[in-house]
Image (cartoon, grey):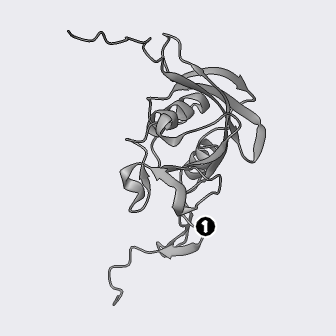
Amino acid sequence: MARSKKVGKKEKNRAYNMRVSLTDSPDIWRLIQIRGDQTLEDLHDAICDAFDWDADHLWAFFMNNHFWDPKEEYGPPEVGEGAGDATETTLDSLNLDQGQEFCYIFDFGDEWRHTIEVTEVEDADDGTYPRIAETHGEAPQQYPDVEEEEEEEEGEGGEEFEDGELAVDDEYGDDYVETDDADRPF
C-alpha cells in the first residue's frame, strides 16, 4: 500500500524592504522592495533606477558594513578576484535579517557611498519586484559639473600670439604653448 504524502502549502518568496540612503546625505534615501530570489545585481539596478543614475560604472556591496573590505565584497565579475559574484548571489542566500545594515558603492571614481538597512522582511506579494516604494529627498545629479565644464570649454580656445603660437589650457588646467612651426628640431 502506497503511503500518502502530506502536501504542505507552497512556501512564499520573501520580500525585503531596504532603505538605501546616501552615506554623506542620510536625508536622501529610497525604500526599495525586492524578492529574496533576486540577486544583488538586481538590487544594484534598482538603486540606479531609484536615484536616476546611469548604470555605467563599477559597483560593489560590502556585506559587513565596512567600505572597501575585500572579505565581504560582492560585485560584478569585472570587480576582480576575491569578490563574490553579485550576478549570482541572491538576497535569500545572504541570510539577511531585519535591522541588518550593509554598504554599497556606485562608481569607483566618484564613490557614491550608500548605507542599506533591511527595514522589514515579509512575504512577497504577486506584484513586480524590485520596486521603489518610497523616496525622500532629491537625488543628486550623477554628473553635476558636466554641463558647466562643456560651457567653459566652448568659450576656451587660447590666446594667439603673432608668431603663430597658441597658449592653451590642457584638460588638467596646465598652461602650455602649441606651435605650428614645422622647422623645430623636436
* Residue at (72% x, 30% y) in the render: 138
Asked whether residue 17 is in view, the answer is yes
Q: What percent of the width, then of the height, locates residue 62? A: 57, 52
Q: Nearer the viewer, residue 88 or 53?
A: 88
Q: In which quarter of the image is the C terminus?
A: bottom left
Q: Which of 141 and 164 is in front in this view?
A: 141
Q: What percent of the width, then of the height, locates residue 66? A: 65, 57
Residue 179, placed above or below residue 153: below
Q: What percent of the width, then of the height, locates residue 39? A: 44, 35
* Residue at (59% x, 73% y) in the render: 175
Q: Quick check: 117 left or right of 53?
A: right
Q: Choose top left, top right, bottom left or bottom right for residue 2.
A: top left
Callout 1: few (<14), some (14-19), or many (20+) C-alpha neighbours within 10 Å?
few
Residue 77, placed above or below residue 27: below
Q: What percent of the width, then of the height, locates residue 3? A: 27, 12
Q: Nearer the viewer, residue 153 or 122?
A: 122
Q: Which residue lies furthest to the right in this view?
A: 27
Asked whether residue 54 is in view, the answer is no
Q: Quick check: 182 left or right of 138?
A: left
Q: Which residue lies furthest to the left in this view?
A: 1
Residue named by callout 1: 173
Q: Which amino acid does label 1 sit on?
A: Gly
* Residue at (48% x, 21% y) in the render: 13
Q: Quick check: 131 left or right of 18?
A: left
Q: Residue furthest bottom?
A: 185
Question: How many numbered badges does the structure rendering display?
Answer: 1
Q: Quadrant of the N terminus?
A: top left
Residue 182, placed above or below residue 109: below
Secondary structure under tag 1 reads loop
Q: Choose top left, top right, bottom left or bottom right for residue 167.
A: bottom right
Residue 107, placed above or below residue 122: below
